Amino acid sequence: MIKTFYPKTNLNKVLEDITIALDITQRQYADAESRYQAVGKFLGDCPKISRYNPQVYPQGSFRLGTVVRPLLDGEEYDIDLVCLLQSSYNQTTQKHIKNLIGDRLKEPQYINQLDREHRRCWRLNYHTESKFHLDIIPAIPDDDSIKILNESRLPQNYINTAIGITDNTSDYYNSLSNDWTKSNPKGYAEWFKDQMKIQLNESIKNLVGLKGATIDDVPLYKIKTPLQRAVQILKRHRDLHFEHDDLDRPISIIITTLSAQAYNNENNIYDALISILQNMESFIGVDAEGNSVITNPVDVRENFADKWIEFPAREENFFLWLSRARMDFESLADVSNLEKLEMNLNEALGSRVVSRSILKNRSLFNSDSLPTVLRYPNAIDYSPNEQFIEEQYPMHLIYDLKINCKVKQDGFREQSLNNLFILKKNNSLKFFIQKNSTPKPYEVKWKVRNKGVKAKSHGVRGKIVNDNGTESKTEHSSFYGKHFVECYIIKNGMCVARHKIDVPIAGPLKVIASSNSRFF
């Protein structure tokens, strides 16, 4: 008898606990907040600075509530702060503003924590239990941008906080000029809030217990909507899979912006993830020269993807990462037990943040209470005709079996699937038995299962077929999805060995990977 299993509620509980492990603790947030407020007061107490009415406030992931812990325990996380001084482009230079802040921080109270001068900021290191550093970015109001952006019809709270920040590599660093690096972290945070306003208001009500509470009453880091959690998960997925390629990995501002644009105020993490991954690509535009454009939502003049022109590997890596993320997270809804879920999540997010959540939620996935064969009517690629070996033969798995796959494409050398992060379309795939301890005679059977949103339109597979006598099976990578191939050994009317291999295939890519890439 085939039973049905609906794992989404349990899956969301696991994902929620994983994002708690990804996040820094409330104590770390509070420690960082008290530290930057103390720095702000210290700067404001300086007569040379106080006449500029300084204001210190956080920007980036700390302000948005999307901070992700570093991959390694010993690494620090960074908190970006703006130190806004009330001046103008025709009154001061970048160098003067930068040195005002730096000279104050060189006084005894902070000199031992002060790092070397950075390009745009001054860094204070805190070698405490919280393990973070503060990057203080000197800035002044960008009145020119505010005037220009007023014509863009963007909401006032998006544009009236535009700033110019210092950059000691600028040709105009020591000159009166309006050629400062443009930024607007406050405006971006307001836009980000608006993308999740429905769930944000619900979260605030639940947090403070007051229906009259407003968004401004609670800082974003104390609230966690499905959008914020989804961004944290996607950033960790990026961190893990580009651990050794920090320079050309997808940048956080692109992941965050496209995620917020694709988010439809889903009320749970898994649905938010799937919606974001399926739709984020549609928010990437193209200019007249055919270059990708990801517009800054609070400054239409800025393209977050402008570096893709100079560094095409960054565009290539973004789309390859997106394809892999789609496969890794779409497949989670089909998981029937905690062991399989743990394996998939470890691969996607790393065991460091997954193991504690799995241990905590073990009771939700009591394997004794789950049927051996599971069907998922709500799955994107559900097929009532999928065949299961458990329905056809008694299971008595007493022998070892291992299959492997060789991948070949015209112009490239043959590679093992085990050595590849993700496949491209139109490859030749030869699956073969690498190890089989079953004594002859026996029968070999194969099952090919295509997965994901494309499987439905191309025809969902999943039938169990006989081997052709070569103990191998040839396939082609036709469309994207986290597919799999499984092999079975049948002896004396029983299934005595089985092995499955995942086949992740990338979707349409705008840039073709080079021959020395991990993508094939």
Image (spheres, rainbow, N blue to C red):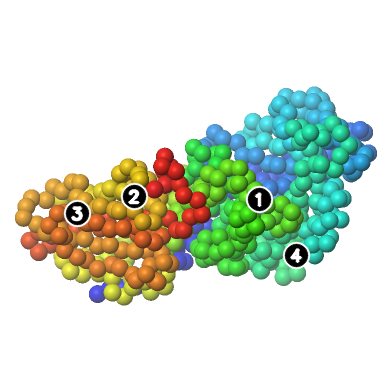
Considering depth in this image, is 469 or 346 the residue closer to the camera? Answer: 469
Percent coordinates x, y for residue 466 in the rendering = 16, 63
Q: Which residue is mark 4?
A: 214
Q: Amino acid at mark 1?
A: Phe
Regarding mark 3 in the picture, which secondary structure is present there? strand
- Real-space Cα distance between discs 4 and 2? 57 Å
**Residue at image location 22% in from the left, 66% down from the top:** 464
Q: Which disc is residue 117 wearing?
A: none
- Real-space Cα distance between discs 2 and 1? 34 Å
Q: Which residue is mark 1?
A: 304
Which label lies toward us, 3 or 4?
3
Number of residues whose C-alpha sits closer than 10 Å to that of mark 2, classed few (under 14), some (14–19) or many (20 or more): some
Regarding mark 4 in the picture, which secondary structure is present there? loop
Regarding mark 1 in the picture, which secondary structure is present there? loop
Q: Which residue is mark 2?
A: 409
Percent coordinates x, y for residue 239 in the rendering = 52, 44
- Real-space Cα distance between discs 4 and 1? 31 Å
Q: Amino acid at mark 4?
A: Thr
Of the two numbered discs 3 and 4 on the same chain, state the one appearing first in sequence.
4
